[in-house]
Image (cartoon, rainbow, N blue to C red):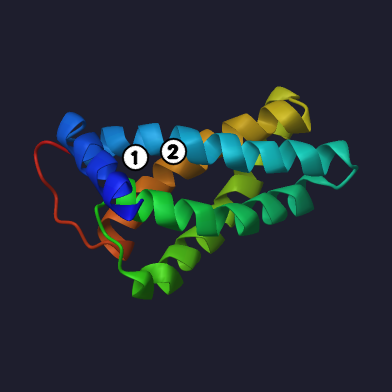
Amino acid sequence: MTQILEIGIQRFHGLVKSKFIRFILVGGLNTVFGYGVYCLMIFIGLPYVLATLISQILGVLFNFVTTGTLVFDNRDRRLLFRFVLNYLLTYFISIGANKACQELFGWNTYISGIGAMIVSALCSFFILKYFVYGSRPKTED
């Protein structure tokens, strides 16, 4: 089974050369997971700050594996601490963006959650690329 997964991963890397494009694609999968958890938490009555925290915590392990493997081709589990620091930082970025979307645009917590995810995703790519996985700038990224 792991051999089949490895072949799939290598084909994905062969088809999508740019780390940024892979980040966007894998981020879609991670976003569906995280936003699904966020919506479930809002639905059961939790405030958006707690819903964001829970979705970040549950999503971080899933995201660590998918982002490390599918985007940066890195399976080094020792990077989990830096990866978690990225999510702590983007948690606060997300809370600020969520609050700003609600106050500036009058968006409800569902829609402002989407706006907050876009802002925090862009910040996250650069943090992951340069701090967590230590990639040097390349022209194809």
The count of marks equals: 2
Query: In terms of image quadrants, where is residue 104?
Result: top right
Viewer-side residue, 131 vs 12:
12
Residue type at tag 2: Gly
Q: Residues within 10 Å of mark 2 (few under 14, many from 20)?
A: many
Is label 2 in contact with label 1 (beta carbons under 8 Å)?
yes
Q: Is residue 71 visible?
A: no
**Secondary-structure class at tag 1:** helix
* Mark 1, residue position: 23
Circle 1 Cα neighbour tier, 10 Å, few/some/many (<14 / 14–19 / ≥20): many
Quadrant of residue 134 in the image? bottom left
| Residue 2, image quadrant | bottom left
Name the secondary structure under disc 2.
helix
Q: Is residue 81 above or below residue 23?
A: below
List the single residue furthest toward the front. 1
In-image side of 3 versus 38 (left or right): left
Viewer-proximal residue among 125 and 60: 60
- Image coords of residue 137 (percent x, y): 14, 49
Residue 28 visible somewhere in the drawing: yes
Q: Is residue 110 left or right of residue 59?
A: right
Q: Which mark is residue 42?
A: none
Residue 106 horizontal side relative to residue 56, left or right: right
**For the C terminus, which image quadrant?**
top left
Residue 61 position within the rendered picture, expressed as x and y whole percent measured from the top left: 52, 59
The residue indicated by pointer 2 is 27
User: Which one is nearer the viewer's eye here, 103 or 44?
Assistant: 44
Residue drawn at x 69%, y 26% as measured from the top left = 111
Where does residue 54 sit, x and y in percent of width and height? 71, 55
Q: Position of residue 75 (x, y in %)?
A: 30, 63
Foreground residue among 27 and 139: 27
Q: Amino acid at mark 1?
A: Phe
Residue at horizontal 36 percent and vertical 51 percent from the top: 1
